[in-house]
Amino acid sequence: MTLLFVFGPPAVGKMTVGREIADASDFRLFHNHHVIEPLLDVFEFETPQFQTLMSEFRQRVLEEAATADIDLVFTLVWALDLPEDAAAMRRHLAPFVEAGRRIVMVELYADLETRLDRNRTPYRLAEKKSKRDLVWSEGNVRDLERIQMNTGVSSPGDEVIAGFPHLRIDNTDRAPEEVAAEVLAWVAASGG
C-alpha cells in the first residue's frame, strides 16, 4: 500500500489533482479540509482548540490508514521552512514508515496569479466553505507567501523529503487529469 503525499501552497490544485488521482485509481483521498471544515463549525481558525484537534484528528486518520489496506492520497500545505512543520510531518509519516508502507511525495507549484485565479473555482468553493469569503481567502493565499511551501531553498523540510521518492510538478497551465495521469505513471514506474 502507498501513501501519496501531495503538498504545495494554497490553491495550487492539491485537492483537485488528488480527486483526479482517486477517481482514476484505487487511491482514496484525504485532503486537509476534510479535517478543517468540520472544526470551523465549532472553533475559530488557529485557536489552540482548533490546532490541537486538527493535529489529533489528522494523525488518527493517518494512523488507521497506515494499518489498513488503503492506498491514500494525503494533501497538505506544508511550511517547509518551519522546523515544527518538519517535526509534524515526521509524526504524520511515522505510522506508514512503522507499518512498512510505501511513501511517495508529489510537490505542486504554480505562480501566485494562477493560484489566486484557482482560489475562486466552483469546485474549490464547494468543497471548502472556509474559502467562500473571497476577501479573506485571497488575503490568506497572499499572506502565506511569507512561508516557504515549495522546494528550491534549503529548509528543514528537505531532510524529510530526502527520505522518499519526490516528484515536483509545475501545474500552472495543466489540466488536473493530466497531472494526475503523470503522477500515477510516476508512482507505477517508481515501484508502486
Image (cartoon, grey):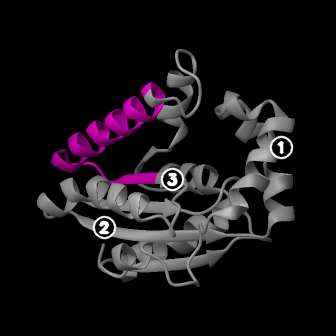
Left or right relative to 65: residue 114? right
Which residue does the numbered mark 3 point to in the structure image? 76
Badge 2 amino acid: Ile
Q: Which residues are magenta?
A: 49-74
Q: What residue type is disc 3 on?
A: Leu
Please determine whether, in this image, residue 90 is positioned above or below residue 62: below
State the CA–CA distance, disc 2 to disc 1. Answer: 31 Å
Mark 2–mark 3 Cα distance, whole angstroms, equals 15 Å
In the image, what residue occupies the spot 78% across and 30% down?
132
Nearest to N terminus: mark 2 or mark 3: 3
Classify mark 2: residues with Cα within 10 Å, few (<14), some (14-19) or many (20+). Answer: many
Residue projecting furthest to the top: 42
- SS under mark 1: loop
Quick check: 30 left or right of 45?
left
CA distance separating discs 1 and 3 = 19 Å
Residue appearing at x 71%, y 41% in the figure: 124
Q: Position of residue 40 (x, y in %)?
A: 57, 23
Q: Which residue appears at 38% of the width and 29% of the height?
A: 53
Secondary structure predominantly adopted by residues drawn in magenta: helix
Res. 120 mark: 1
- Residue 115, percent from left and from top: 78, 58
Mark 3 Cα-neighbour bin, 10 Å: few <14, some 14–19, many ≥20: some
Dot 1, crowdedness within 10 Å: few (<14), some or many (≥20)?
some
Q: Amino acid at mark 1?
A: Arg
| Image mark for residue 103 | 2
Please, what secondary structure does the residue beneath circle 3 have?
strand
